[in-house]
Amino acid sequence: MKDGLRHLAQTLQLYLKTEIQDESQLPPAIDFFQIFTKVTCNCFTISNGEMQDVGVGLYPSMSLLNHSCDPNCVIVFEGYQLLLHSVREIQIGEELTISYVESLVPTRERQKQLMRQYCFECDCPLCQNQEKDAEKLAGEEHAWKEVKDAVNEVKYPKSKEEWKHVLARCQNLLRSHKSHLPDTNIYQLKMLDCAMDACINLESWEEALYYGSRTLEPYRLYYPGFHPLRAVQLMRVGKLQYSQGMVPQALETLKQAYNIMKVTHGADHSLMKALMEIKEECEAMMRIQ
């Protein structure tokens, strides 16, 4: 990575020579390299309403926040606007923390990522206890390694044909490892998410609901308390239940999403407003029934 950034800095310096005639005015390539590395360590991945990555942004004041794998704050976006919300009561003088990495992955993988990208080891209680690591890698190792490789190979499809290929791959692996992997295995969980996304893009709503419903218990296990990812997943499943005429179940699921999202996103967030709209539709239908 460092060699790539160094090469990019040197290329940029050569390009700038056409714009700045006096070479003495150009900073050395190492200065560019230092800038790139600082930006890499301090930028934020911008996500859309469904917590899918859509870009990268630099928010200097938010870069001051330190990391914990069990943070007391979360970050969500409204367009390009970054919003910081506390997810539990914070004591006077207590440090605000966010998670720099995906808390779903096992402790060893989180530690590797933190050291590789941020050059530090985390000693938070979650890392010390290695809590839930056994559940995250439950099942037969050969099976979850195959599923892990398949998940990592998936790039965001751009056409229905590509989505069909992704879904077929997911279906085959989920079928072949049915007795080898529980849904709490994180790679099995990611495969279920991938299958759900494929079905939604192919408008196979009933099958999407099947896969989505299987993710809810693992999401509850790995994203306890107030977590934006769980709120969004509950909302997605609730919408699918509603589309299938399962109004009572949809209302219960959407209520769970609402209780989390009002903390993680806030009442004024556009996703919260969309959730309120469909929740109110369910409530109206229940009154009629």
Image (tube, rainbow, N blue to C red):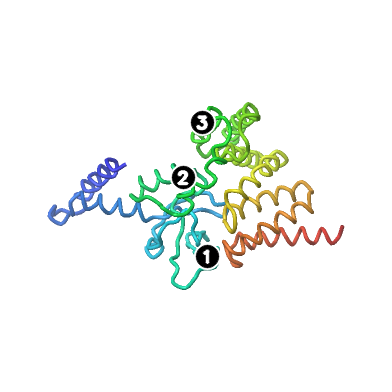
Mark in the foreground, 2 or 1: 2
Q: Quadrant of the C terminus?
A: bottom right
Q: Which residue lies at the image location 23% right of the left edge and 47% below the top edge?
A: 15
Q: Give the image location of residue 160, x and y in percent.
A: 60, 36
Taking the image as shown, residue 148 lies to the left or right of residue 280, namely: left
Taking the image as shown, residue 24 lies to the left or right of residue 111, namely: left
Q: Kindly report the distance in space between the C-alpha atoms of the residues bearing marks 3 and 2.
A: 17 Å
What kind of residue is marked 3? Lys
Residue at disc 1, secondary structure:
strand
Q: Which of marks 2 and 1 is nearer the N terminus?
A: 1
Q: Give the image location of residue 93, x and y in percent.
A: 44, 71
Task: Please give the residue where the numbered disc 3 appears in the rendered image.
Answer: 145
The circle drawn on residue 86 is 1
Q: Give the image location of residue 265, x and y in percent.
A: 57, 62
The circle drawn on residue 46 is none
Q: Which of marks 3 and 1 is nearer the N terminus?
A: 1
Task: Please give the residue where the numbered disc 2 appears in the rendered image.
Answer: 107
Residue lying farthest to the right in this orientation: 289
What kind of residue is marked 1? Ser
Taking the image as shown, residue 131 lies to the left or right of residue 121, namely: right
Question: Could you tell me if the residues under marks 3 and 2 are in contact, i.e. CB atoms within 8 Å?
Answer: no
Residue at disc 2, secondary structure:
helix
Q: Which residue lies at the image location 66% right of the left edge and 60% below the top edge?
A: 258
What kind of residue is marked 2? Thr
